[in-house]
Image (cartoon, grey):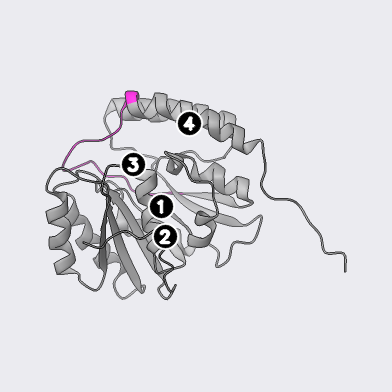
Amino acid sequence: MSSINPQDCPNLNMDLSVIIPVRNESGNILPMAAEMCAVLENRYDYEIIYVDDFSTDTTAEELLLAARQYPKRLRILRHASPYGQSSALLTGVKVARAPIIVTLDGDGQNDPADIPALVERLPATTVPGHVWLVIGWRKERQDNLVRQFSSKIANAVRSRLLKDATPDTGCGLKVFHREAFLALPHFDHMHRFLPALFQRAGGKVMSIPVNHRPRQYGKSKYGIGNRLWVGLTDLAGVLWLMRRPCHAKTREIQ
């Protein structure tokens, strides 16, 4: 497996880098890798970067098998300890070789077939006031009642306080510019607040309805205990950030 070097400065010579953070996703790796390559091949020059957040099941072995099947497309990074999804996302973006980033969850519930529709709606540059983030909207969730309940409450509270105009910030399917993401403040669980963070930086967010599928293998890592209440705690910090804008309105005078 590739070692992680946060100082890597890759040549941005591809169309897309797909970042997939995973932890204990045995059974989901090979089917998803096959789907991804089937959708993207002959459409983009792309790479798929799996970031294994210190899995303790057979995820690492399955990633190696996938890399052997798709040696020109898959890259594998592994954390030496479990650091969380936001850290895994940042690890992948730092070493990405494309200026456009696509993210998906590793549980197979996001449909890779939705990627082109989101990519097409992302403008070529990050002009202030234009769309900087295109995010999926799972209008028909295929989750258990606990996940749906906790997500519904967290989304409602977040939307009311942050006014991020995003109905589903928890969807793992997102498309954005690498450079814009790296300029954001980074902290644990920040992936849950990307719409608000991009808006704070001067961009807009577009939500696109996407397919959502039942989980076939493994168990969800999130529930009321580690999603709803932790999310509400993080919300206080993001709300503090939103009240301190980082961009200024300017005009050319000469």
Sort mark 3 into few (<14), some (14-19) or many (20+) by Cα contacts within 10 Å. Answer: some
Q: Mark 3 points at which residue?
A: 84
Percent of width and height locating residue 19: 34, 57
Q: Which amino acid does label 4 sit on?
A: Asp
Determine which quarter of the picture holds residue 7: bottom left
Percent of width and height locating residue 11: 43, 74
Task: Name the quarter where the N terminus is drawn.
Answer: bottom left
Q: Which amino acid does label 1 sit on?
A: Leu
Examine the rendered structure and indicate whether residue 183 appears above or below residue 148.
below
Q: Which residue occupies 48% across, 61% down?
A: 178
How far is mark 1 from mark 2, CA to CA? 6 Å
How far is mark 4 from mark 2, CA to CA? 23 Å
Q: Which residue occupies 61% across, 50% down?
A: 201
The stretch of residues the image draws in magenta is 208-225
* Magenta residue check for 217: yes
Tell me the tag on residue 94. 2
Question: Answer yes or no: do the residues labelled 1 and 2 have beta carbons within 8 Å?
Answer: yes
* Magenta residue check for 76: no
